[in-house]
Amino acid sequence: MEMESPSPFPSPFKGDILKGKVALLTGGGSGIGYEISAQFGKHGASIAIMGRRKNVLDDAVSALRSLGIPAVGFEGDVRKQEDAKSVVEATVKHFGKLDILVNAAAGNFLVAAEDLSPNGFKTVIDIDTVGTFTMCHEAFKYLKKGGLGRSSSSGGGFILNISATLHVTASWYLIHASAAKAAIDSLTRNLALEWGTDYDMRVNGVAPGATGDTAGLSKLMPQEIMNKTVEKLPLDKVGEKWDIAMAALYLASDAGR
């Protein structure tokens, strides 16, 4: 599995900016999700990760603990409301509260629209979009009144939804993922309006483009296409998982208020 890659730069943030916070991350055992888990933990947070593969969870938790990060993993499928509910409750039971939810779980594969079955389309929508809403829905009561509850001087809890840039224009052979990510962006804006206004909660989104050293990039973009793509990028490189994690860290901290 993918583990944390070496940071290209030192963190620009103080090491305790998330001290005392509890974060639950779906898809937090690999790729971008794991990098966010590690950086949140390195900056003071206790980490719970949710995923369907026990071996991935176990490896990720072991890696996080080796960094001195309080971490626990819970098996669950974001498509199932009962799993979402049980993992949120298990996190609160284990750590005593919930302050931060990061929705990074995603499903994807390359397929031409005419070859994509309605069930295949629905599967990605269910994981990415319905899963994101389900986790937000089940975490809401804890984020609303938890350690960062509305009565707190620092406001309500924090939700971060990970989408993409596929839908900004159009993408070959990714109509299912593109639709799912567009819906996540809309969901994020609407929850930010409703829950930000009514409960002083923050709901933000990060939309990564092509990100190096991830399974998604290696599966979706052959190396020869990657080489041609990089040549056209202003920075002559794709993004790194660390870049996304630093954006997430800023948004989750008080600096992002």
Image (cartoon, rainbow, N blue to C red):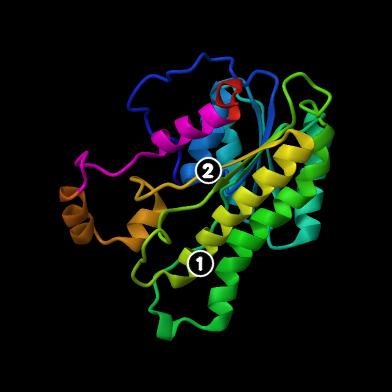
Amino acid carrying label 1: it is Ala
Image height of 176 relative to 35, above or below = below
State the image coordinates of residue 107 (x, y, percent, origin top left): 52, 62
CA distance for labels 2 and 1: 21 Å
Residue 101 is drawn in which quadrant? top right
- Residue 97, numbered label: none
Q: Identify whether 126 is placed above or below 256.
A: below
The reply to whether residue 143 is visible in this rendering is no
Give, as a three-letter code, the residue at label 2: Gly
Residue pictured at 78% horizontal, 29% vertical = 95
Q: Quadrant of residue 37?
A: top right
Secondary structure under the numbered disc 2 in the rendered image: helix
Q: Nearer the viewer, residue 209 or 85?
A: 209
For residue 198, above or below residue 226: above
How packed is label 2: few (under 14 Cα within 10 Å), some, or many (20 or more)?
many
Residue at the disc numbered 1: 179
Residue 60 in the image: state x and y as whole percent: 56, 40
At horizontal 70% and vertical 38% (from top left) the residue drawn is: 196
Q: State the residue at coordinates (54%, 22%).
A: 42
* Relative vertical location of residue 203 with respect to residue 189 in this rendering, above or below: above
Q: Which mark is residue 33?
A: 2
Q: Nearer the viewer, residue 3 or 191?
A: 191
Residue bounds of the magenta highlight: 233-251
Residue at horizontal 54 percent and vertical 64 percent from the top: 180
Residue extending farthest to the bottom is 114
Mark 2 vs mark 1: in front: 1
Q: Is residue 249 left or right of residue 93?
A: left
